[in-house]
Image (spheres, rainbow, N blue to C red):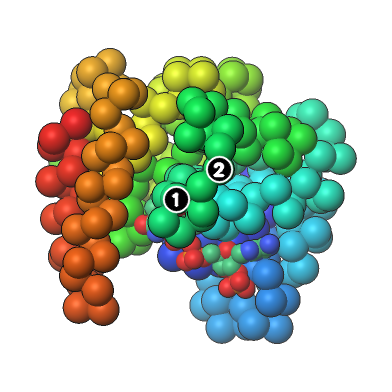
Amino acid sequence: MKIGIIGAGNIGSTLARKLAKAGHSVLIANSRGPETLKNLADETGAKAVPAQDATQGVNVVILSIPFAKLPLLREFIARLPDDVVVADTSNYFPVRDGQIPAIDDGQIESLWVSEQIGHPVIKAWNNVLAVVLAGKGLPAGAEGRIALSVAGDDPAAKKAVMSLVEDTGFDAIDGGSLAESWRQQPITRAYCSELSADELRAALAAADRARAPQLREEMVKEFMALGDKITTEDIVRLHRAASAKA
Ligand SMILES: NC(=O)c1ccc[n+]([C@@H]2O[C@H](COP(=O)([O-])OP(=O)(O)OC[C@H]3O[C@@H](n4cnc5c(N)ncnc54)[C@H](OP(=O)(O)O)[C@@H]3O)[C@@H](O)[C@H]2O)c1
């Protein structure tokens, strides 16, 4: 497939590495311009381009930028043809993104994103930590392969993104419609818990929407208490502990 990735941070750069390695043709962009992505492009074979160009001539656009900045992409995304698949890896963390009243009042995160950018999205890779995405993928059929859920409304678009999730080393399971995608938002049992396909299906079914924002805020407080001393192990441990309470 031809894939454009907007956002070249923890998640976007890892997706570029993995999807290029899987044989896809990858365009990658950030906010500062392609000249700042030369090393990543040299390493992965992905082509660094301005953000607008990452949406041109591709089958799939993956958005992997901070949640509150997604509306800035509307000028490129809203005019894309309907058959271009747009995948959204984002999560809303008010401490980082600022308060967004529509979401605080109950709008589903990826429905807000779709509205802001003017194109429906498929929610994927949002419920895996970057360090796990980078280091814990396995070939299809391998024992202990972690599953990730993919939510969205267009069956063909969801199928395309599920096949890309498989290409990144994870079992892809159908997480339902975008209206149901809160089931894989922070902090639910399905969020960053490194589950098998059967465990993830059970976690999605058992998700508790009312408690998720409260658990998210409690986890963020623990993150902040660790300050600069926070390690990758701390991040994994805190996410697991938070999700176990969900
Ligand atoms: N980190 C995780 O473990 C994790 C896990 C699951 C989901 N997520 C979600 O995935 C998304 C990305 O997270 P991340 O950790 O990869 O973020 P990150 O490391 O902070 O990287 C963000 C990237 O977005 C780019 N960017 C920001 N504004 C942009 C704009 N207007 N146009 C084009 N590019 C722009 C940045 O480019 P510049 O550096 O040039 O500004 C940077 O490459 C977030 O929504 C996050 O919640 C993260």
- Does 184 sit above or below residue 201? below
Q: Is residue 79 above or below residue 48?
A: above
Measured as percent of width and height from the top left, residue 239 is found at 21, 49
- Identified at 19% across, 26% down, the residue is 199
Question: Quarter-wise, where is residue 189 in the image?
Answer: top left
* Residue drawn where x is 29% and y is 46% of the image: 217
Residue 171 in the image: x percent, y percent? 33, 35
Can residue 161 be seen here? no
- Which circle marks residue 100 in the picture? 2
Residue 73 seen in this snapshot: yes
Q: Earlier in the sequence, mark 1 or mark 2?
A: 1
Where is residue 186 shown, x and y percent of the image? 34, 40
Tell me the quadrant of the picture where the N terminus can be found. Answer: top right
- 228 vs 144, left or right, is right
Asked if 135 appears above or below 68 in the picture, the reply is below
Nearer the observer, 79 or 37: 79
- Tag 1 near tag 2, CB within 8 Å: yes
Which quadrant, please, contains the C terminus?
Answer: top left
Q: Is mark 2 within 8 Å of ligand 1?
A: no
Q: Is residue 131 above or below residue 32?
A: above
Q: Residue furthest right?
A: 79
Question: What's under tag 1, amino acid-wise?
Answer: Pro
Looking at the picture, tell me which residue is in the foreground, 215 or 19.
215
The residue sitting at 20% across, 39% down in the picture is 243
Q: Position of residue 31 (x, y in %)?
A: 68, 70
Dot 1 crowding, Cα within 10 Å, few <14, some 14–19, many 20+: some
Left or right: where 242 falls relative to 91: left
Q: Which residue is mark 1?
A: 94
Report the amino acid beneath label 2: Ile
The residue depicted at 74 percent of the width and 52 percent of the height is: 73
On the picture, is 69 further left or further right than 162? right
Cα–Cα gap, marks 1 and 2: 7 Å
